[in-house]
Image: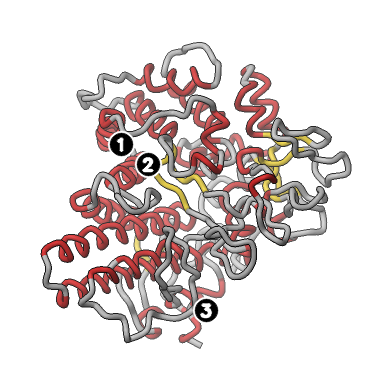
Amino acid sequence: MKKSIIIILAALAAISCSDLLDIRTEASMPSAGLDYSKPENVFLPVSAAYASMRLSEGWAQNYVGVMEIVSDDADKGSTEADGPTVAQLDKFTYGPDNNNVEAMWNYFYNISSAANYAIESMDKFAEAITSEAGQQTVVECRGEARIIRAYAYFNLVRLFGTVPIIDRTMTADELATANAKKPEEVYAFIYKDLDDAIAVVPDSHSDYKGRYNKYTAMALKAKVALYREDWNESARLTDLIIASGRYSLMSRFKDAFNVENEGGAESLMEIESSDMGQSTGGMPLCYYAFIQGPRGNKEPFQGWGYKVPSQNLIDFFDSRGDDIRKKVTLLVRGETTPEGDEVIESCTNPYYNGKVYVPTRTNNRSFNAYGLDHNMRIIRYADVLLMFAEAMANGATIAPTSGYTADMALNEVRSRAGLAATTATLDNIYDERRAELSLEENRFFDLVRWGKAAKVLGPLGFTAGKNEVFPVPSAQRQLNPFLPATPGYTY
């Protein structure tokens, strides 16, 4: 039984391809025949780690359920009978046996496992490669894999609180006795990975624009710092990103989510998807957008209808006169998009997530493939500006090199949304984060770290002292008795 522990599985089969991350993950390790003396092979294990982040159909449903449907910005959607365990998330009635929760444990540990393998592979490359340029590539790729691992543990600690740190390839027996670490220990581990990455990863990559760079690591660490209330570090890092001049807001809010702007001026971290220009056959596609597409609509503009905007979110937009962002965030039943795609009157749900809308004119597949080219936006420049504003408003004492103030950062985001300037109080920043980042898997975690979850989510079923974290899955505790039961849940 111990051999079935899911976190030992590394989806790591890698093949060469013409586009970043376009590698199908397989449930096997790279073959022993990988030549570690060739510099052109160095990126392959890292590419496989990237590929482990891509959401298939099942992962996508689990992801949107655990990461967003628990917030006040989204409802389950779909049909009443579909996805009963996702409905548990929506109503906070889930327990340690919820398969969506367990899937997220497995998903993020799989990413960590893939990153671990990539990091260990770099040691083999370092021993075998003789050229100076090849050695530099090894150093940079090791840092890149650390960013991916840090992302996995950031989500694990946010979701579950107390979790094991698996930082190397382990045997099944070792995994079955791994002790869980307190959140502060996990955050320290994440900090170290990101510090190591910041020191060695380049500012940009000349080959694939979607690869994570120094600024990705800085933005991710700045975000982690908010959860530690490390205001100076979050302010310092976001200030450096702003001062670099490498990133900027897209001119229109809508542009930040268009397929053609993926990896663009506003993007610091994405999870990529591509059909590699194919219309049929095996394609490394991400089902994140598909799972949220209009249910019951005409093909190929059709999906499963999960994670729909809540009436609470719509009322919030209306209360602010936030029309630009509301229009982009909502696909409305009975309306036709400016690109000519109709959401027909008979669709199951009244609203769908407009941020993942992909015009059907981009679909060249021979099957219903709505949104499969859509990249998941993990960190946008707007988030960087709002993190800077929040850290400064919380008393950060750095002297900004960018020349920005909290007010300037906040109002740059508001200006694009057509809103008047305001003062960067914490409440204003909190509201702006909700408006700007709604349905982007931030809201629930923001409410928890602000200490507002019980008040805001209580009417939806949230219980203080329990639902701030998800339960360590029962199946994982059976495999590893050293994993503690999560307080508040019945095992």
Classify mark 2: helix, strand or loop.
Answer: helix
Q: Is residue 280 above or below residue 64?
A: below
Classify mark 1: helix, strand or loop.
Answer: helix
In the rendered structure, are the residues bearing label 1 and label 2 in contact, judged by CB atoms less than 8 Å apart?
A: yes
Give neighbour class at mark 1: few <14, some 14-19, many 20+ (Cα, 10 Å). Answer: many
Q: Quadrant of the C terminus?
A: bottom right
Give neighbour class at mark 2: few <14, some 14-19, many 20+ (Cα, 10 Å). Answer: many
Residue 424 location in percent, x, y? 41, 18
Which is more foreground, mark 3 or mark 2?
2
For label 2, the residue is 223
Q: Quadrant of residue 406?
A: top left
For label 3, the residue is 478
Q: Amino acid at mark 1?
A: Ser
Q: Amino acid at mark 3?
A: Gln
At x 46%, y 25%, the residue is 429
Task: Give the numbered dot on residue 234.
Answer: 1
At x 33%, y 38%, the residue is 229
Marked residue nearer the N-terminal end (1 or 2): 2
Q: Is residue 246 left or right of residue 334?
A: left
| Distance Cα–Cα, label 1 vs label 3 | 38 Å
Q: Amino acid at mark 2?
A: Lys
Marked residue nearer the N-terminal end (1 or 3): 1
Of residues 423 and 475, the one nearer the viewer is 423
